[in-house]
Image: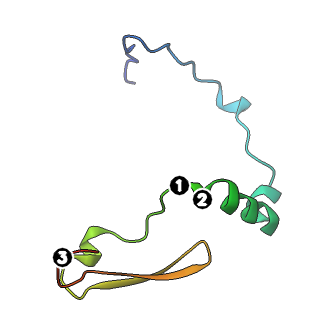
Amino acid sequence: MSERRSIPGVAPRSTPPLARAATLPSRFYLDPAVLEAEKERIFRLIWQLVARADELARIGDFVPVTVLDEPIVITHAQDGQL
């Protein structure tokens, strides 16, 4: 087992016992209304990964994706820009 080391200026964190761990009720994972709320309140406010660099390595490469119900295409143009 590895030894926990303290980081200067950072308060140590305790690890609660696994028996006390909890998860959200299943409706938060399955309810379409919760997904829509997350889209508006979280995902529209932050960057979203749409492709990896190796998928667009060559001129002419493209990746069609849908981000938050919006279909888009990312392309590697002749001038090298995405």
4 horizontally vs 11: left or right: left
User: Type of residue at label 3?
Assistant: Gly
Disc 2 vs disc 1: Cβ atoms closer than 8 Å?
yes
Q: Which residue is mark 3?
A: 80
Q: Which residue is nearer to you in this view: 57 or 23?
A: 57
Between 24 and 52, the one lying in front of the other is 52
- Position of the C terminus, as image quadrant, is bottom left
Q: Which residue is mark 2?
A: 43
What residue is pinned by disc 1?
46
Q: Marks 2 and 1, how far apart in space? A: 6 Å
What's the residue at 40%, 18% (across, down)? 4
Q: Is the residue 16 above or below the residue 56 in the image?
A: above
Q: Report the coloring of the rendering.
A: rainbow
> Is 4 above or below relative to 30?
above
Q: Which quarter shows the N terminus?
A: top left
What residue is drawn where x is 63% and y is 54%? 42
Residue count near mark 2 (Cα–Cα under 10 Å), binned few <14, some 14–19, many ≥20: some
| Residue density around tag 1, few if under 14, some if 14–19, many if 20 or more, within 10 Å | few
Question: Quick check: 41 above or below 77?
Answer: above
Q: Mark 1 or mark 3, which has the lower sequence index?
A: 1
Q: Amino acid at mark 2?
A: Phe
- x then y, percent, for residue 24: 76, 47
Q: Is residue 74 left or right of residue 65?
A: left
Question: How many angstroms separate mark 1 from mark 3 (CA)?
Answer: 25 Å
Residue closer to the observer: 3 or 35: 35
Which residue is pictured at 57% across the width and 18% down the height? Answer: 14
